[in-house]
Image (cartoon, grey):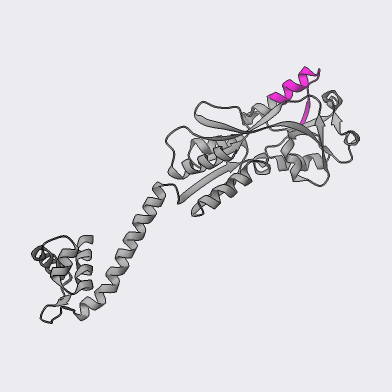
């Protein structure tokens, strides 16, 4: 049984006339009659009572009709969904992000994308930058919002550049000042991401401090900014964080600007190989809204 047999049956069932059905199908009547007979033979039942005038459906034909209508409706739905998928209007999208991205570019990009493509299923994964790149490499996520030195195997787009600020416990003596010189941090203990993560940020902080005549005392390493802020509250040390993290308003933490610092980049990264239609749509929204 093929879909064309079902289409032939529906045409005859609708017109109750082989000649009109053949005309509607743009074919000759004898081949149409032969195809219906072949269908009846395969089913083992008569679908039409040819002795009646006008032609009538048998009881079997009457029972068969709604089922065929359902099959054809499902086929049409499958065709439509396939076309939507080819246009990137439906599908799956896994997005990695870090805390800074969620405080800056990502919410507006997600809002714009969901308004345009509400049928796409988005899976959000909060991950540090190094793990995002690992999951990008093995296909666990489709794109990532991260801070990291660029690598050749990925495409990148810079979404944002922002200065660093100092995160201090609110009872810290330096919290009384609104702008700090980096030299004031010479005796402080620092909380930084581990250098083994491959992030350039660790070494950028070391280089920045060394240009001011000291090497930072790294007392604790932490991957996620939420953990960093928790350690700051506990008095374990201070941290240099992207300015956008001020929006988190963590109780017990104050943020102070630095007179001399560097800018940290928030990047959108994706694999260089061919893109899925859904990812192409997402990148179009992200790169045009950023």
**Which percent across, then down, holds residue 268?**
57, 36
Seen in the picture, residue 182 relative to 85 is either above or below; the reply is above
- At x 8%, y 65%, the residue is 30
- At x 46%, y 32%, the residue is 272
Left or right: 119, with 226 as reference point? left
Magenta stretch: give its range: 204-220
Residue sticking out furthest to the left: 30
| Camera-nearest residue between 87 and 165 | 87
Left or right: 47, with 75 as reference point? left
**Which percent across, then down, holds residue 149?**
60, 27
Query: Which quarter shows the N terminus?
Result: bottom left
The magenta stretch spans residue 211: yes
- At x 86%, y 41%, the residue is 170
Count of numbered badges drawn on the protein: 0
**Which percent across, then down, holds residue 95?**
55, 44
| Camera-nearest residue between 277 and 147 | 277
Seen in the picture, residue 101 relative to 61 is either above or below; the reply is above
- Say if residue 141 shows up in the picture: no
Q: Quadrant of residue 240?
A: top right
- At x 65%, y 26%, the residue is 200
**Which percent across, then down, holds residue 119?**
49, 54
Left or right: 40, with 171 as reference point? left
Seen in the picture, residue 249 relative to 173 is either above or below; the reply is below
Left or right: 241, with 265 as reference point? right
Q: Quadrant of residue 12?
A: bottom left
- Say if residue 36 shows up in the picture: yes
């Amino acid at each position: 049984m093929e879909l064309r047999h079902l289409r032939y049956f529906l045409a005859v069932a609708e017109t109750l006339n082989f000649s009109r059905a053949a005309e509607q199908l743009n074919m000759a009547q004898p081949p149409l009659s032969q195809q219906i007979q072949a269908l009846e033979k395969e089913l083992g039942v008569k679908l039409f009572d040819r002795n009646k005038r006008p032609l009538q459906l048998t009881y079997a034909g009457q029972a068969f009709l709604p089922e065929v209508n359902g099959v054809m409706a499902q086929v049409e739905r499958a065709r439509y969904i396939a076309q939507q998928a080819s246009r990137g209007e439906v599908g799956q999208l896994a997005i990695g992000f870090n805390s800074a991205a969620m405080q800056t570019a990502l919410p507006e990009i997600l809002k714009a994308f969901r308004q345009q493509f509400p049928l796409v299923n988005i899976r959000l994964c909060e991950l540090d930058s190094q793990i995002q790149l690992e999951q990008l490499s093995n296909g666990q996520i489709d794109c990532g919002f991260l801070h990291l030195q660029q690598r050749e195997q990925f495409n990148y787009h810079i979404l944002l550049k922002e200065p660093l600020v100092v995160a201090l416990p609110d009872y810290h003596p330096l919290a009384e000042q609104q702008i700090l010189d980096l030299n004031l941090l010479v005796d402080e203990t620092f909380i930084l991401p581990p250098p083994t993560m491959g992030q350039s940020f660790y070494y950028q902080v070391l280089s920045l401090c060394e240009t001011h005549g000291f090497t930072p005392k790294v007392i604790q390493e932490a991957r996620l900014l939420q953990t960093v802020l928790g350690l700051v509250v506990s008095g374990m040390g201070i941290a240099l964080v992207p300015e956008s993290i001020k929006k988190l308003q963590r109780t017990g933490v104050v943020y102070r600007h630095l007179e001399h610092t560097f800018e940290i980049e928030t990047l959108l990264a994706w694999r260089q190989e061919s893109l899925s239609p859904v990812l192409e749509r997402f990148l179009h929204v992200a790169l045009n809204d950023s």
